[in-house]
Image (cartoon, rainbow, N blue to C red):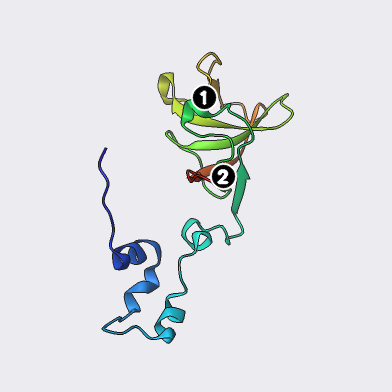
Amino acid sequence: MSLTILTRSERLQHMLPESRELRITGFQSPAEDEKERGFSLDRIVGIGAPQMRAVMVNDDGLIGFGIYPGDRLIVDRSVSPCAGNYVVAHLDGADSYCVRLVSTGDKNTLMLVDAQSATLPLTFEDPDCVEIWGVVMWVVSYVGRG
């Protein structure tokens, strides 16, 4: 695995496009601190946008996807799913929503794959059987101690 540690300005440019306007030289005044507005996870993941929702994972049914109980999923309800996306879906006959991986099957049909490998994939050619609620854009995990 490889990681790139970003400098403060690189992090800001990646996360906040308006950071290019910042000019920090020498002593940084409190006015510059205010201009920067600090780190905001809400702005980074877009949670303030009306189509974005946060969903908490309540059980260990997604561990096969590397998603753990207590993780928060940031879901975009305006994005159309494609292969490789995780989606929040409501399956016909189910009492609640679930998370599935969108994959391609025979003849490039889209399928929903469960984190539990014993469950058979489900095609979503029949819109009456599957309702896609949104596409998972971010997984936020707590890894601290104490």
Callout 1 environment at 10 Å: few (<14), some (14 to 19), or many (20+)? Answer: some
Residue 22 falls in image quadrant? bottom left
Give the percent coordinates (x, y) of residue 126. 61, 26
Q: Secondary structure at mark 2?
A: strand
Precedes in sequence: disc 2 or disc 1: 2
Residue furthest top in the image? 118
User: What residue sits 45% from the left and 27% below the top?
Assistant: 103
Give the percent coordinates (x, y) of residue 112. 53, 26
Q: Secondary structure at mark 1?
A: loop
The answer to which of 77 and 14 lies nearer the viewer is 14
Q: Is residue 123 above or below residue 56?
A: above
Q: Amino acid at mark 1?
A: Ala
Cα separation between marks 2 and 1: 17 Å
Q: Is residue 31 left or right of residue 123?
A: left
Q: Amino acid at mark 2?
A: Arg
User: What residue sits 50% from the left and 39% below the top?
Assistant: 81
Question: Which residue in the protein does label 1 denote?
Answer: 115
The answer to which of 128 and 2 lies nearer the viewer is 2
Give the percent coordinates (x, y) of residue 101. 49, 30
Question: Which residue in the protein does label 2 denote?
Answer: 72
